[in-house]
Amino acid sequence: MKDFFQSIDLEDQNTYLKIILFILIANIIGTNIFIPDYFSFELAWRIWTWSLLADIVFIGTMTACLLVPLEMHSRSDSSMRTPIYGIISGILVYLGYMASWFFVCLFSDEWTIDDYGFVFYGYWGAIACMLTSMVIMSKSNAK
């Protein structure tokens, strides 16, 4: 793993704080599918109790959704690298949602695979994560 993530200091506590912030934003904003009209922490909290495997998949995919574009961003020389890799991060978040929601629907008692369509309402979380990753990337530009 250290071979791929050459530009990311995996021993720095700030890296882990960024990952935790990113995961919280993905979880809280992504589970609030009615944001313009309604916002709650209830589903964001309860979703962690439905499937341990889905939790592990979610944490792993969201970590990759931040670290992979961040590493690619640091290796790029493009003047448009922050928006490009921010958008890639948002797309990866959506794919991560799809993977973890699949396991929620498969292994939880509250949801079935027929409820898988709810994953497509997580666009607020993908947008929020895209913007968050762009902020993190722009801060890494200054260093």
Image (cartoon, grey):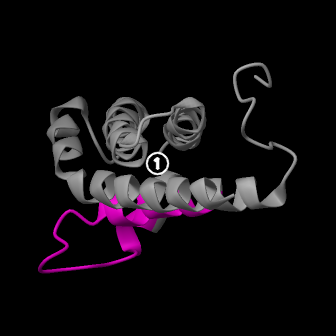
Instruction: List x then y, in percent, for residue 21.
Output: 58, 63
Image quarter hosting the N terminus: top right
Instruction: List x then y, in percent, for residue 49.
Output: 52, 54
Residue 91 is left or right of residue 17, and the answer is left
Residue 23 belongs to the span the image colors magenta = yes
Q: Residues within 10 Å of mark 1 (few under 14, many from 20)?
A: some
Instruction: List x then y, in percent, for residue 55.
Output: 54, 43
Kind of element beneath mark 1: loop
Residue 46 in sight: no
Residue 23 is left or right of residue 115, and the answer is right
Query: Could you tell me the amino acid type at mark 1?
Result: Trp
Does 9 appear above or below 95?
A: below
Closer to the camera in the image, 60 or 84: 84
Q: Which residue is mark 1?
A: 50
Instruction: List x then y, in percent, for residue 70.
Output: 56, 41
Majority secondary structure of the magenta segment?
A: helix
Does 117 appear above or below 45?
A: above
Residue 105, image quadrant:
top left
Tell me the residue at 34%/39% (across/down): 84
Tell me the residue at 42%/48% (across/down): 82
Tell me the residue at 55%/32% (across/down): 68
Residue 48 belongs to the span the image colors magenta = no
The span picked out in magenta is 20-44
Residue 71, image quadrant:
top right
Tell me the residue at 41%/66% (across/down): 28
